[in-house]
């Protein structure tokens, strides 16, 4: 373990055990460093009394039976963007005139604390979470941890900087237009943006309430995924909560070889160094065995335009409209200019915008017929603080080209470090997947991060990836393994019945030496029948597919007599459910066991 803990595992190792081994020295030291750092990164630091109460609570819980399982984040410190409530602490949204003391802790924060995590501070942001730059705050503008001349990214500026510096291993941000991804790219860390509704936004001051997300910053994908696993789930306190676990892998048929959709052209104002770095990232994807598919992003850009040029800006006005009317000087000038556009939209415009989004979403959904995930630059360039001062609206707007459309479409995204430019600036990529694919996206992202081999934030340290994912992982839908031996094999006529139900190929293997295979006469398409014949059989090739439980019934309804589902013994002694045949149907059927499997028999014809 390094001298200063960095990852979740480091911090868990530094925390005291239930038997009294260890102490809170590392955590108290982190709290002291944060208190000394102050603005512009931190807007409010937990008092010593607030910290002591949290630690005493953890110590009392640690001696209870099953404490280790119930507190997977035991002793892990985190910080929270200051538009997310913590009971007894101020919430400012970077606007002193709007500040209030929260009476209740946001659901996402409470779930982290219930899992044993300890909050240390609240962090700076673009005021009212309106911006992608991190400069729209009266408390100052945090710079990128890689360059004092460049912006940190926003709106979750302080949270990203805190993680990149190694102050804490986890930080919560929010993401409406890209606020959980742009700061990750500009600070060389992981930014996980869940599917809207997967994590409760109860206790979060809204930006656009209908599409807001609580996001996670971390140094590793594993750590971000573990935080998501703790926070995710339905919440009656959030009217937009809609937790639906999706698949475990991005591709049902070939999880090791994905089709990654990339823009067929980058915008002309893309930084040349970033354009070259993106080509390098695409080359890395090909080296890892993935197919890179050029796509027309025009429908996605049309969706993105709705966020600020359409009636969704009225959602921001719904939050701060009263303040804008009574005390306009209290609102940052750039934020005021953006949000005031809402007064130009009518109720009819709001419905027209919804209709347009529905039409564009239908076009965008066709994307997934051509690819399994999107691969995009997190940002087209990294502006300086001087450039933002000269053009606060335009420079900000350019940053959202690959982020603004994601939440409007209900998709999930994962921003990852990719490389460092010759100028010494971090370059990041973002992978985007359909809604509900959060667990699959994280599983892919951890392998990408391991291959990229980048340093962790601005710490200068690297870590070897774990061989297996942590046990605490975002939920994916339950599956049931089904063994197939005939027309349902990959590439054969009935394989589509598996794919259309989201089944994923787990492995190819063989039965034990207890089976015989027959070609059933008069079947369309041609099918085999397999029979267990103890002491008189041989091994038969098969495939095992993981079928989502929710779709298993509809699949079994398609299985015709004389085929049925039974227990099949595999060559290694395992048992799995799969297709077997009733003996009466095999009278006069040709025994094709000598071919070793249906595919070889078909090839012989």
Image: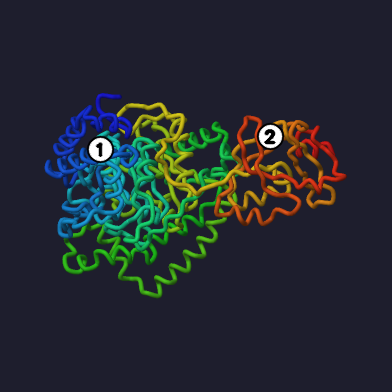
**Label located before the other in sequence (2 or 1):** 1
At horizontal 28% and vertical 24% (from top left) the residue drawn is 2
Q: Position of residue 584 (x, y in %)?
A: 81, 48
Residue 580: x percent and y percent? 72, 44
Image position, residue 449 (x, y; %): 43, 34
Left or right, 598 with respect to 370, comes to: right
Residue 195 drawn above or below residue 472: below
Please, what secondary structure does the residue beneath circle 2 have? Answer: loop
Residue 62 image label: 1
Q: Quadrant of the N terminus?
A: top left
Whole-percent x, y for residue 102 in the image = 19, 56
Asked whether, in this view, residue 314 is left or right of residue 79, the answer is right
Q: Is residue 149 visible?
A: no
The answer to whether residue 486 is seen in the rendering is yes
- Whether residue 418 sits left or right of residue 133 in the image: it is right
Q: Residue at x 62, y 30 (%)?
A: 572
- Residue 511, numbered label: 2
Mark drawn on residue 216: none
């Amino acid at each position: 373990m390094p001298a200063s803990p960095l990852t979740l595992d480091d911090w868990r190792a530094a925390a005291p055990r239930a038997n009294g081994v260890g102490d809170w020295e590392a955590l108290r030291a982190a709290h002291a460093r944060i208190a000394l750092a102050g603005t512009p990164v931190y807007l409010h630091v937990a008092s010593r009394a607030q910290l002591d109460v949290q630690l005493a609570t953890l110590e009392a819980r640690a001696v209870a039976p099953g404490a280790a399982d119930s507190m997977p984040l035991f002793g892990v410190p985190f910080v929270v963007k200051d538009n997310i409530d913590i009971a007894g602490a101020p919430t400012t949204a970077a606007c002193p005139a709007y500040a209030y003391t929260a009476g209740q802790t946001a659901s996402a924060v409470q779930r982290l604390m219930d899992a044993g995590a300890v909050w240390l501070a609240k962090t700076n942001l673009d005021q009212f979470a309106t911006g992608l730059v991190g400069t729209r705050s009266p408390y100052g503008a945090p710079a990128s941890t890689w360059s004092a001349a460049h912006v940190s990214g926003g709106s979750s500026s302080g949270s990203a900087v805190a993680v990149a510096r190694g102050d804490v291993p986890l930080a919560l941000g929010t993401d409406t237009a890209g606020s959980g991804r742009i700061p990750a790219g500009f600070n060389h860390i992981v930014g996980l943006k869940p599917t809207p509704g997967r994590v409760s936004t109860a206790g979060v001051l809204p930006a656009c309430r209908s599409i807001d997300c609580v996001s996670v910053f971390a140094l590793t994908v594993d750590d971000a995924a573990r935080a998501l696993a703790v926070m995710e789930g339905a919440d009656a306190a959030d009217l937009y909560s809609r937790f639906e676990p999706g698949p475990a892998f991005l591709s049902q048929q070939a999880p090791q070889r994905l089709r990654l959709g990339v823009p067929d052209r980058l915008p002309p104002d893309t930084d040349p160094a970033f354009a070259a770095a993106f080509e390098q990232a695409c080359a890395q994807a090909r080296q890892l065995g993935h197919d890179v598919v050029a796509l027309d992003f025009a429908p996605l850009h049309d969706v993105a335009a709705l966020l600020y040029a359409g009636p969704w800006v009225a959602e921001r006005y719904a939050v701060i409209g009263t303040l804008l009317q009574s005390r306009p000087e209290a609102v940052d000038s750039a934020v005021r200019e953006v949000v005031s556009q809402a007064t130009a939209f009518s109720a009819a415009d709001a419905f027209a915008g919804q209709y347009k989004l529905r039409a564009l979403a239908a076009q965008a959904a066709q994307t997934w017929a051509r690819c399994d995930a999107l691969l995009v630059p997190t940002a087209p360039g990294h502006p300086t603080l001087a450039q933002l001062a000269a053009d606060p609206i335009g420079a900000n707007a350019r940053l959202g080209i690959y982020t603004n459309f994601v939440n409007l479409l209900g998709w999930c995204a994962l921003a990852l470090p990719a490389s460092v430019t010759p100028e010494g600036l971090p370059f990041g990529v973002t992978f985007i997947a359909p809604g509900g694919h959060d667990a699959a996206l994280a599983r892919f992202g951890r392998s990408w991060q391991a291959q990229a081999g980048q340093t962790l934030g601005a710490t200068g340290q690297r870590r070897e990836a774990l061989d297996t994912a942590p046990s605490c992982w975002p939920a994916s839908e339950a599956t049931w393994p089904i063994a197939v031996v005939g027309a349902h094999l990959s590439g054969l006529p009935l394989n589509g019945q598996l794919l259309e139900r989201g089944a994923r190929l787990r492995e190819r293997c063989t039965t034990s030496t207890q089976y015989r295979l027959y070609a059933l006469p008069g079947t369309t398409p041609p099918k085999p029948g397999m029979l267990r014949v103890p002491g008189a059989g041989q091994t038969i090739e098969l495939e095992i597919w993981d079928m989502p439980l929710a779709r298993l019934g509809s699949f079994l309804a398609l299985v015709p007599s004389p085929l049925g589902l039974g227990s099949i013994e595999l060559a290694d002694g395992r048992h799995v459910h799969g297709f077997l045949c009733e003996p009466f149907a095999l009278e006069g059927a040709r025994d094709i066991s000598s071919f070793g499997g249906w595919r070889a028999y078909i090839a012989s014809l």
